[in-house]
Amino acid sequence: MQRTLLFKILIILGITVLIAVALGMIQSTINDRAQFRDDAVKSVSSESVREQTITGPILVVPYVDEYVELIPAKSKNEPAETVRRSVTRKHLVFPNQLDINGKIDTYRRYRGIHQVLMYGGVHAIKGDFALPALNALPRASPNSSLTLRPAYLALGIEDVRGIADFPKVDWNGGAIEFQQGSGLQALRGGLHADLPAMELGGKAKFSFTLKLNGIERQHVVPVGKNNTITLASNWPHPQFGGDFLPSPERTINENGFNATWTIASLATNAQQQLRDIEVGSEPGKVCNVDSFSVAFIEPVNVYSMAERATKYGLLFVALTFAAFFMFEVLKLLPIHPVQYLLVGLALVLFFLLLVSLSEHIAFLTAYLIASAACILLIGYYLAAVLRDWTRGLGFGTALTLLYGALYGLLVSENNALVLGSILLFAVLSGVMVATRKVDWYQIGKTSAI
């Protein structure tokens, strides 16, 4: 029975829809695998340690504010009443100079086939405080009587499970051990060190070493008036984030990175934000505090790369089917719809092979193996379908170029749009040039389609 051109096109479109459904199922599988990986990170962090945030140190000066409050008379016949009140306050003193020098090493932990990047850091922290004068402390009344309570040094640590030793702070030449709890509502977790009696109005120097473990990302809150934070690591693929970026002189190479942040209090609201949280109504809330972070990320996220690749899957199928159709038109050699379907399914299986292999080996190696397997299978099959091994070789070569172009799109994310546009324009140009003399009315009447 003679088949018209329109009827054949409708069949190919129907097969393309079926292939699109299969691609959607594979993309759903990739999303599920990515979720399993996220669950592995949550599992490790719940059992060991979370992302870390270092805040401080902050000098806390507690004191009792005693004052007299005059209560107006309720009526003309009653005298005004005076009431003595007492309020316990905490005055937060932030470092005048805060220097942090951290050396961070990374290592991996496993949950099944999934890798989770962990880190362990040694941070040398030092600086000084300008101690406020007694009469400079906030008070309810100018005539208030202030009574100082023992001051302490508060250090915010997001997850104290990551503390690897028992740190001691050198405070004006004397060693003091840190204890559990930050003593501040503004810091959910952390340590504190009870300080000896001191005279306000002077200066105090401090220094200590903090060994801290964490998972995937470390944050630092710049609480000092002048902050100089230097972080170095053996991880060669850092991602800098947060409210501040390191200085342009940072170095990143295959041996790791070294970056320095120089931040003045004029550039951050961290001090005021912490004060607001401390006196606010939401104890333990530490969000919306200015900070910066370093993420220790894998250079290639296999699931995001595989997901991006599947977005081009329908384009792969459409281009291959278009090549088949052009071959039928130009060579008058019919290709059965079942053969279209089998080749389309082979193209779809490439993406499933890619994500499954990349979970165990490097993404580039997985890509080469998956693409080579599909190219060889389709080339071998088409050599028989098209009744000439050179034709199968030609299609295999075209698929090789297509897979190469896809990899270029994946690794050049910033240039993906322009590369994809050039590819589509080149394909359309080739089709138009190849079919410029085809009589489509005559093709629709032949039995070769």
Image (cartoon, helix red, strand yellow):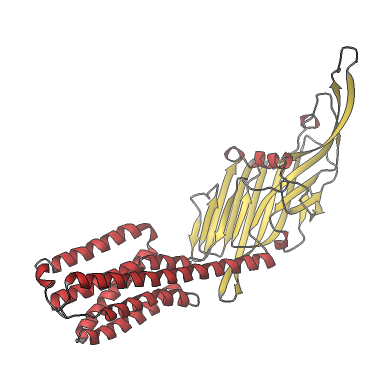
Looking at the image, residue 245 sits to the left or right of residue 408; the answer is right
Looking at the image, residue 407 sits to the left or right of residue 244; the answer is left
Farthest-out residue, front: 1
Please indicate, yes or no, whether residue 12 appears anywhere in the rendered image: yes
Looking at the image, residue 197 sits to the left or right of residue 287; the answer is right
Q: Is residue 412 above or below residue 23?
A: above
Percent of width and height locating residue 385: 23, 85
Farthest-out residue, top: 76
Percent of width and height locating residue 347: 34, 76
Q: Residue at x 86, y 18 (%)?
A: 74
Q: Foreground residue, 249 or 245?
A: 245
Q: Is residue 169 above or below residue 449?
A: above
Q: Residue at x 33, y 69 (%)?
A: 17
Q: Residue at x 16, y 81 (%)?
A: 1
Quadrant for residue 307, please give it. Answer: bottom left
Percent of width and height locating residue 57: 71, 48
Q: Foreground residue, 28 or 307?
A: 28
Please indicate, yes or no, whether residue 302 appears anywhere in the rendered image: no
How many marks on residues?
0
Image quadrant containing the C terminus: bottom left
Quadrant for residue 234, please give it. Answer: bottom right
Percent of width and height locating residue 444: 13, 71
Q: Foreground residue, 40 or 19?
A: 19
